[in-house]
Image: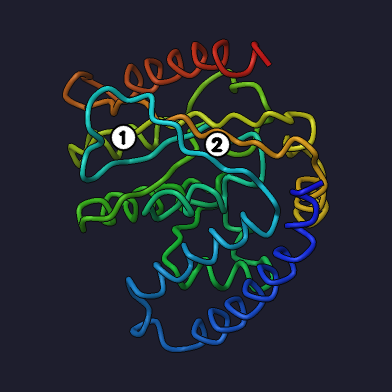
């Protein structure tokens, strides 16, 4: 009852703040690319935090890592829902890799593009090569990046294999991979399959089990692997183990 009363008064204010910041970011995105930069990236991350709160999601970062997190990293995560496109930037200072169609999202696409998102047409070899080089350049330029190694939203279960792009970037740049396992308590509602983005976000907003845990594990260093294939297989095996720990027990 208390939570319902709080949301009754707080959520409208949050949504008003979200809409206002969306307008500001959208207008700024029409400036020449020269004027984009860290300030816009910071504002877009702040927008993501407000959006997560507006969806009434209880997002928690859970540290399972024993060693300190590296200063720079290539973040990887499983991809069961639409929420992580907003929740990961809300929690981590990263520049994401996204499918080309995201650029066409109304308002959101323009904001993400101006904030520095790297796009790829997965079915196009030339686009994949260009995206890989952009990711390497971004990491060599001091940025953290995030990649979903399943190659898209594959549902609640870990996909049968990981694509090797993230691990290729790690080997080329010498930067470690930071694995984050995403756990949605309400798996049925948060899983994103064939619904439109708007419908899925509406379902998430209505969920009564809004707890979301993002488990951060120790970074994996490229020096321990001779090639991207063995690197990817090792990471995939870790995720299968975490799947048993975090999903099979729900």
The residue sitting at 64% across, 34% down in the picture is 80
| Image height of 187 relative to 248, above or below | below
Q: Is residue 225 left or right of residue 156?
A: left
The residue sitting at 57% across, 53% down in the picture is 86
Give the quarter of the image for residue 180: top left
State the image coordinates of residue 183 (x, y, percent, origin top left): 59, 29
| SS state under label 1 | helix
Label located before the other in sequence (2 or 1):
2
Please identify the quadrant where the C terminus is shown: top right
**Circle 1 Cα neighbour tier, 10 Å, few/some/many (<14 / 14–19 / ≥20):** some
Q: Is residue 211 left or right of residue 182?
A: right
Q: Is residue 242 left or right of residue 170?
A: right
| Image height of 97 relative to 213, above or below | below
Q: Residue furthest front?
A: 2
* Residue carrying label 2: 151
**Circle 2 Cα neighbour tier, 10 Å, few/some/many (<14 / 14–19 / ≥20):** some
The residue sitting at 53% across, 52% down in the picture is 98
| Image height of 30 relative to 162, above or below | below
State the image coordinates of residue 81 (x, y, percent, origin top left): 66, 39
State the image coordinates of residue 68 (x, y, percent, origin top left): 22, 32
| Count of labels in the image | 2
The residue sitting at 54% across, 66% down in the picture is 47
- Taking depth in this image into account, of 139 and 61 the one nearest to the observer is 61
Q: Which mark is residue 185?
A: none
How far apart marks 2 and 1 lie (CA) works out to 14 Å
Q: Which mark is residue 168?
A: 1
| SS state under label 2 | loop
């Amino acid at each position: 009852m208390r939570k319902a009363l709080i949301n009754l008064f707080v959520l409208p204010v949050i949504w008003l703040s979200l809409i206002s910041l969306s307008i500001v970011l959208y207008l700024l995105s029409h400036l020449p690319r020269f004027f984009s930069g860290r300030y816009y990236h910071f504002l877009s991350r702040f927008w993501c935090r407000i959006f997560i709160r507006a969806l009434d999601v209880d997002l928690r970062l859970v540290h399972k890592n024993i060693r300190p997190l590296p200063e720079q990293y290539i973040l990887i995560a499983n991809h069961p829902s639409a929420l992580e496109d907003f929740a990961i930037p809300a929690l981590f200072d990263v520049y994401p890799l996204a499918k080309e169609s995201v650029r066409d999202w109304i308002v959101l696409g323009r904001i993400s593009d101006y904030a520095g998102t790297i796009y790829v047409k997965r079915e196009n070899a030339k686009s994949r090569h260009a995206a890989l080089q952009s990711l390497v350049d971004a990491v060599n330029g001091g940025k953290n990046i995030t990649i979903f190694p399943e190659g898209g939203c594959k549902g609640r279960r870990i996909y049968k294999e990981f694509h090797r792009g993230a691990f290729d970037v790690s080997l080329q740049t010498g930067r470690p991979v930071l694995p984050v396992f995403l756990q949605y308590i309400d798996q049925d509602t948060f899983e994103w399959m064939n619904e439109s983005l708007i419908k899925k976000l509406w379902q998430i907003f209505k969920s009564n089990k809004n707890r979301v845990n993002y488990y951060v594990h120790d970074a994996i260093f490229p020096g321990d692997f001779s090639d991207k294939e063995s690197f990817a297989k090792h990471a995939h095996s870790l995720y299968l183990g975490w799947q048993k720990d975090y999903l099979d027990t729900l």
